[in-house]
Amino acid sequence: MKHITNDLSANETIYEAIRQIAFHKLVNPRTNVMKNTSKISGYVVKVHTDADDALCGTVDVQEYLSSLSEQQSLENGLPVGLHEGVYLSAIQNNENGMVIIPYLYSDVVITTDPATLREYVIQYSHADTVQIDAHNKVVIGVTETKEWEDSEDSPDIDELEKTGVHAHTTYTPVSILSEVAKGDNESDKSIFQVTADNIVSQHDKSQILLDAKQILAKYNAKEIVIKEDGVYLGSGSAKEPGVLGNQLATLLVDWLGTLSQMMTPTMMGPQPPANLAKFVSLQAKVNSYKASISGFLSKTVKVAE
């Protein structure tokens, strides 16, 4: 039995020797992992943004070093574990599609494309820029569902009932639509839509519209409309001109003052009107309105000349 055991040990030794020879230059001696197959953890030490630089659109990643000698070498300025020109994705086109640029000094995990031997980022802790550029549609949002229960009767995660609470933004080539809802009723929903022609914001009975011809603020049937030719209160088809309060007050004061000086011919000679005291009282009242911004002069609504 002892002789058989020794033979097995010798066979294992021979096998390991042959394996080492076969894997020569294929195994990373520092990590003892097959080259181009491992995931490397590190942090971003440089982001190449210079358009004239051949490495533009890539990052430099420094590995986290475990051995003391490697750390000392790094502290002495030797580029141990430094990966230069790491691509942001396996498909290098930073003008279209999805691109994520990690934040400087953020943690990343990189790997190697075995076909091209290019290194690229597959995970990151903090993003500096996130680009999503699609041909037809991009939808970003959150949809609330009822809590999953650990029981035999509980539905699968993808079958959980929706609560109606959600926040979604949909991008198309011609529009942006954002919707936030706290229930299934239309009154519980807010919508914000942008197109090349207009901007619309709506919640229940309230609506704001901006386009090239007007700004419309609407609640139920009441409107405030701003157009090139003026401001319309109550309705966009309003026809009655607005009154300038100060000028109206001045006119009334002058008018009442003239009436208080009116004289009527009588057999006894010119006499003031019998109700002169009322004209004087009204004149004083209008003067007080004008001085204190009260009465028929609004404190909150102003009309431009």
Image: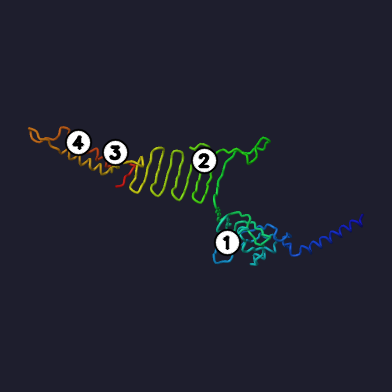
Q: Which residue is mark 2?
A: 181
User: Residue at 57% of width from left, 42% of height from top?
Assistant: 143
Instruction: Quote the CA–CA distance across marks 1 and 3.
Output: 67 Å
Where's the N terminus, which quadrant? Answer: bottom right
* Of 221 and 109, the residue lying toward us: 221
* Of 39 and 157, the residue lying toward us: 157
User: Residue at 67% of width from left, 35% of height from top?
Assistant: 153
36 is higher (above) or lower (below) than 251: below
How far across and how far down the image is residue 224, in percent?
37, 42
Counting residues from the N terminus, which is met first, the one under dot 4 or under dot 3?
Answer: 4
Q: Nearer the viewer, mark 3 or mark 2?
A: 2
Q: Which residue is mark 3?
A: 296
Q: Nearer the viewer, mark 2 or mark 4?
A: 2
Helix, strand or loop at label 3? It is loop
Instruction: Quote the CA–CA distance across marks 1 and 2.
Output: 39 Å
Which label number is shown at residue 279? 4
Helix, strand or loop at label 1? It is loop
Helix, strand or loop at label 4? It is helix
Number of numbered labels in the structure image:
4
Q: Are marks 1 and 3 in contact (CB under 8 Å)?
A: no
User: Residue at 49% of width from left, 38% of height from top?
Assistant: 186
Which label number is shown at residue 143? none
Instruction: Quote the CA–CA distance across marks 2 and 4.
Output: 60 Å
Counting residues from the N terminus, which is met first, the one under dot 1 or under dot 3?
Answer: 1
Helix, strand or loop at label 2? It is strand
Q: Are marks 1 and 2 in contact (CB under 8 Å)?
A: no
Residue type at tag 4: Phe
Instruction: Quote the CA–CA distance across marks 4 and 3.
Output: 18 Å
Q: Which residue is mark 1?
A: 57
